[in-house]
Amino acid sequence: ATEIQADLSEILVTEEQILAKLDELALRVADDYAGKDLILVGVLKGAVMVMADFARALPFHAPMDWMAVSSYGASTKSSGVVQIRKDLDTDLNGKHVLIVEDIIDSGLTLSWLLENFESRGAESIEVLALLRKPEAAKVVIDCKYVGFDIPTDFVVGYGLDFDERYRNLRDVAVLAPHVYS
Ligand code: PRP
Ligand code: MN
Ligand code: MG
């Protein structure tokens, strides 16, 4: 295994800032979903860390399910073609669904997922994303719970990967261009 730090040009959001933000979002979600039948749907693999910390900040039962989709693979650009690698185990019919994502970049993954979920009869569907790149949007996603708006640099860490690496970094950092160019 090689060192991660040398591949980073800048720490963008620290673990501490992330956890504080997720606590804040959890308070809003707790308020908005009081008395409702909520299910959290995490988008594998990037959303694993967000889900782990966000779900634990919620004060009530919040069942989790997971959908694995991928559009990036070993590239820093979205292919625009979303593939289902693992589908949900849960029937969304009548449920209040909160999709948990690490990042909205071009928006293509979520726009595809939202359309896919709408056909499953959910009572409501909202999105929580830790990060969003407003200037990279190819489709604008209606995201109710956003952690941080960030510039368009390719970021890794806290679940976000480049070619399956860097997910285990605690902070969100900008990947140094020498790593992928
Ligand atoms: C990344 C990220 C989001 C998506 C955002 O997933 O985790 O799910 O891309 O990009 P978009 O808004 O341009 O669609 P990726 O496809 O890399 O799969 P992964 O979560 O397994 O890393
Ligand atoms: Mn993802
Ligand atoms: Mg990825």
Image (cartoon, rainbow, N blue to C red):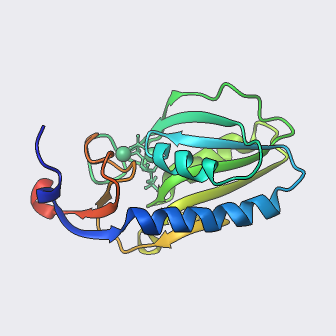
Q: How many marks?
A: 0
Most foreground residue, 35 or 176: 35
Q: Quadrant of residue 72?
A: top left
Image check: 151 left or right of 114? left
Q: Is residue 20 above or below residue 69?
A: below
Image check: 90 left or right of 93? left
* Residue 110: image location, x then y, percent: 56, 52
Q: Is residue 143 in sight in this rendering?
A: no
Residue drawn where x is 72% and y is 66% of the image: 28
Residue drawn where x is 60% and y is 45% of the image: 113
* Residue 65: image location, x then y, percent: 64, 34
Q: Is residue 51 above or below residue 130?
A: above
Q: Quadrant of residue 164?
A: top left
Quarter holding the N terminus?
top left
* Residue 18: image location, x then y, percent: 47, 64
Residue drawn where x is 74% and y is 46% of the image: 97
Image check: 162 left or right of 116? left
Residue drawn where x is 29% and y is 63% of the image: 173
Q: Is residue 19 in sight in this rendering?
A: yes
* Residue 105: image location, x then y, percent: 44, 61
Of all residues shown, which one is farthest toward the right?
35
Image check: 81 left or right of 63? left
Quarter holding the C terminus?
bottom left
Most foreground residue, 12 or 107: 12
